[in-house]
Amino acid sequence: VGGLLGTFDGRLLFLDLTQDEDGNVLVGQDPPYAAIRLVDPATGAQSTTELAEEYEGKVTLADGTLWFATASGRVTA
């Protein structure tokens, strides 16, 4: 569960929010993200890459790099 950010190498790039042990999505001002999901629009094939750690904040995809910016001002790429 997450949002479409754009495209990467011709595939749709989604970020999936972290879920608790019951499968409920964690939400809030700076929701934590757990994985990147790429979807081939022609075939529907998907690949998921778990993030090394959870990242929070507003997310931007720019030139193939994901940027996470929190309300406190912390920025991670």
Image (cartoon, helix red, strand yellow):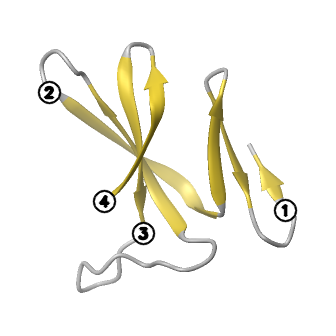
Which of the marked residues, 3 or 1, is nearer the chain's N terminus?
A: 3
Q: CA distance from mark 3 to mark 2?
A: 23 Å
Label 3 secondary element: loop
In the picture of the structure, the residue carrying the numbered disc 2 is 44
Which residue is at the far right?
Answer: 73
Picture disc at residue 1: 4
Q: What amino acid is labelled 3 in the image?
A: Thr
Under circle 2, the secondary element is loop
Residue 18 is labelled as: 3
Question: In this rendering, is residue 66 above or below 12?
Answer: below
Total numbered badges shown on the rendered structure: 4
**Residue 20, placed above or below residue 59:** below
**Residue type pointed to by label 2:** Gly
Residue neighbourhood size for the residue with mark 1, other residues' Cα within 10 Å, grouped as few (<14), some (14–19), many (≥20): few
Residue type for callout 4: Val
Badge 1 marks a residue whose secondary structure is loop
Q: Nearer the viewer, residue 52 or 63?
A: 63
